[in-house]
Amino acid sequence: RSHYRKIFEDGTCIMRCNYYPPCKNPDVTFGTGPHCDPNSITILHQDQVGGLEIFTAGKWFAVPPRQDVFAINIGDTFMAFCNGRYRSCIHRSLVNEERERRSLVYFVSPKEDMVVRPPEDLVLGSNRVYPDFTWSSLLDFTNNHRRTDLQNLQNFFPWLLSSQPKVPT
Ligand SMILES: O=C(O)CCC(=O)C(=O)O
Ligand SMILES: [Fe+2]
């Protein structure tokens, strides 16, 4: 626990307010398309309209809106911090034909230059699932090179390796 507490000291958290106007074609339109959050942990509150869905066991499930509930979501960076033990969750949000919808999302992230690496006692006896990377490089990837989707990490590592300056031998 102290390891994880240290990781988020001086972190670079951001809050996003999402606004989804009513949409006449909710069957063919997403508010937010299916994606995994690239950051570490997401704390989300949605209004009473509802629309957040998560994908698990091969199906989409609605997260019922409740005023007194925050949805806590694991993102890709936390999945790497815990060597894949907890998985980031694919989610999306639907739009509503009649009503506008709002959600408030707090993205918890470490400092940008933090090297994302699981604590050694979590890796003991097993292999590292992901190589080291910095949060800023994953942020650069998802902001500037490829829109965040279901396969963030799978697409990120080949990009990271190919974009690293080659060390002359
Ligand atoms: O509006 C929602 O319920 C989901 C928003 C979301 O997934 C995001 O902002 O990353
Ligand atoms: Fe999200």
Image (cartoon, helix red, strand yellow):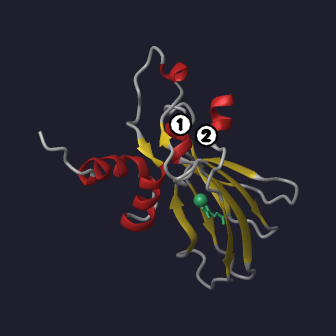
Placement of 23 over or under 77, stated as above or below = below
Q: What element carries label 1?
A: helix
Placement of 40 over or under 144, stated as above or below = above
Residue at the top extreme? 125
Distance, label 2 to label 1, CA atoms, is 9 Å
Tell me, yes or no, whether the two marked residues, 2 and 1, touch with CB atoms within 8 Å: yes
Res. 57 mark: none
Residue at the left extreme? 169
Answer yes or no: is residue 4 visible. Answer: yes
Residue at the spot 78% in from the left edge and 70% down from the top edge: 49
Figure quadrant of the N terminus:
top right
Residue at the right extreme? 68
Residue at the spot 73% in from the left edge and 52% down from the top edge: 71
Q: Name the residue under label 2.
A: 7
**Kind of residue sitting beneath label 1:** Phe
In the drawing, does residue 53 fall left or right of residue 36? right
Figure quadrant of the C terminus:
top left
Residue at the spot 63% in from the left edge and 69% down from the top edge: 94
Tell me where residue 86 appears, x and y as whole percent: 57, 35
Placement of 4 over or under 95, stated as above or below = above
Res. 81 mark: 1
Q: Which of 49 and 127 is in front in this view?
A: 127
Tell me where residue 88 appears, x and y as whole percent: 55, 45
Residue at the front extreme? 168
Judge depth for marks 2 and 1 and give the one in front.
2
Q: What element carries label 2?
A: helix
**Kind of residue sitting beneath label 2:** Ile
Q: Which of 19 and 14 is in front in this view?
A: 14
Residue at the spot 68% in from the left edge and 36% down from the top edge: 5
